[in-house]
Image: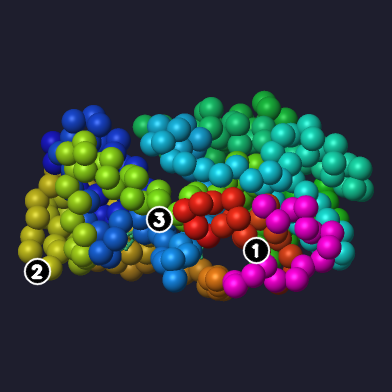
Amino acid sequence: MRVCVIGGGHNGLVAANVLAEAGVEVEVFEARNVPGGLADSREFKGVKVSRASYVLGLMPSSLVKKFGIPTIKQDPFQTLFVDGKVYPFWREPEKRRKELLTRGLELFPEFDRKLLEFKKMIDEEFTFLDSPPSMEDVKEEAKRRGVEEIMELSSGKFLERYLPKELHRAFIYPGMYDSPAYLVAYFYSPQWSVVPGGMGTIGKILAQRAQSLGAKLRLGNLVSRIEAEGGRIKWIESGRKKFQFDAVISATSPLVTWKLIGEAPKVQSMRPHWVKYNMVFREIPKLPEALKPFYASILDIEAGELLFHSASDDSLGE
Ligand SMILES: Cc1cc2nc3c(=O)[nH]c(=O)nc-3n(C[C@H](O)[C@H](O)[C@H](O)COP(=O)(O)OP(=O)(O)OC[C@H]3O[C@@H](n4cnc5c(N)ncnc54)[C@H](O)[C@@H]3O)c2cc1C
């Protein structure tokens, strides 16, 4: 069987690894000249900076282990600085809950337990399935585990139950308060870690591994069309050439996929409410004294997020 993966971001590359491992003949078509997609590093004067995605935490830990992705586990994994108060989020759950309780977040322990139980449910019951589960299946299992509110409420309403308003923005992007509360669980990850050399390290590792298993990586190959007939793939087009495969996996965005199959997008494209600037500092900017013990953490301050991991990363990542 011959399979084509469109898009050599980390999801396409994971697919290529899994398929090649199973003995499938696989080719990845990637438009850019480097693999990794948004898991990508750039170098400025010897300092490597993650171009887009910058911390690892949403990839299932089984895959992080399987692919041997190196991580720096900064502890606390994140520190919030809101209205002059410091809230450190330690990796160890009991330490984290105790500390935030003593800092006045009375309902944090329950909030934290519920989010982690929900994530455990997704890992144990709803990851790597042959077909997608129904919403009802997920709701039922969530109820069985006592976390059904995460399937029922909006992000804003769920956060209101447990945390003061000024902390909400640390758990969901402002502008997304009406989105379902399961997105709060999705973004909340005590696994957030920094990757030495920046996120591009992930792209490199996955690409090399897929190639060593026999997958073919076609960089600089933009796919312009997927042609199907009667529910079967006929060919894909790249650089005015047609290529035939038994199956095609599109690991590009749904919008791109719809365009490639020649249909109008079925969703409105989302306009992000935020901008990311990559900056390389000569020295650590002056921050409030109270934050000094937490410089190894991701610092979440009013102006955005700051990462200073070069201090602990000898590859000069981030
Ligand atoms: C600014 C920013 C910061 C983020 N920060 C984080 C973070 O810190 N941690 C985190 O976990 N997530 C973060 N995310 C989200 C994360 O980056 C994405 O969820 C993840 O990279 C998606 O991976 P992917 O492989 O699905 O897609 P992508 O990484 O987008 O890869 C898709 C690939 O497909 C290629 N492609 C597209 N169209 C075609 C075509 N027609 N033909 C051939 N190739 C094509 C693209 O060039 C690209 O390489 C961030 C996203 C952004 C934008």
Relative vertical location of residue 82 with respect to residue 315 in this rendering, above or below: below
Q: Nearer the viewer, residue 296 or 202?
A: 296
Q: How is the image coloured?
A: rainbow
Secondary structure of the residue carrying numbered label 3: helix
Provide the residue designation for mark 1: 306
Mark 1 vs 2, N-terminal side: 2
Gap in Å between the C-alphas at discs 1 and 2? 44 Å
Q: Residue 217: image x %, image y %?
A: 20, 51
126 left or right of 22 in image? right
Which sits earlier in the primary sequence, circle 2 or circle 3? 3
Give the answer, above or below, for where 262 lies relative to 91.
below
Q: Residue at x 7, y 64 (%)?
A: 241
Marks 1 & 2, CB-CB < 8 Å contact? no
Any part of residue 181 in sight = no
- Of labels 2 and 3, the one closer to you: 3
Is residue 284 magenta-colored? yes
Horizontal arrangement in the rendering, residue 109 relative to residue 13 (left or right): right
In which quadrant of the rendered view does residue 238 lie?
A: bottom left
Nearest to N terminus: mark 1 or mark 3:
3
Which residues are drawn in magenta? Answer: 281-296
The verdict on residue 267 being magenta is no
Please name the residue shown 90% across and 48% down the image: 103
| Amino acid at the residue labelled 1 | Leu
Please say if the residues under marks 2 and 3 sit with CB atoms less than 8 Å apart. Answer: no
Can you give x and y, in whole percent of width and height, for residue 309 in the image?
59, 55
Q: Report helix, strand or loop for mark 1.
A: strand
- The quarter of the picture where residue 24 lies is top left
Which residue is identified by label 2? 240
Q: Amino acid at mark 2?
A: Arg
- Picture disc at residue 200: 3
Q: Position of residue 260 (x, y in %)?
A: 25, 63
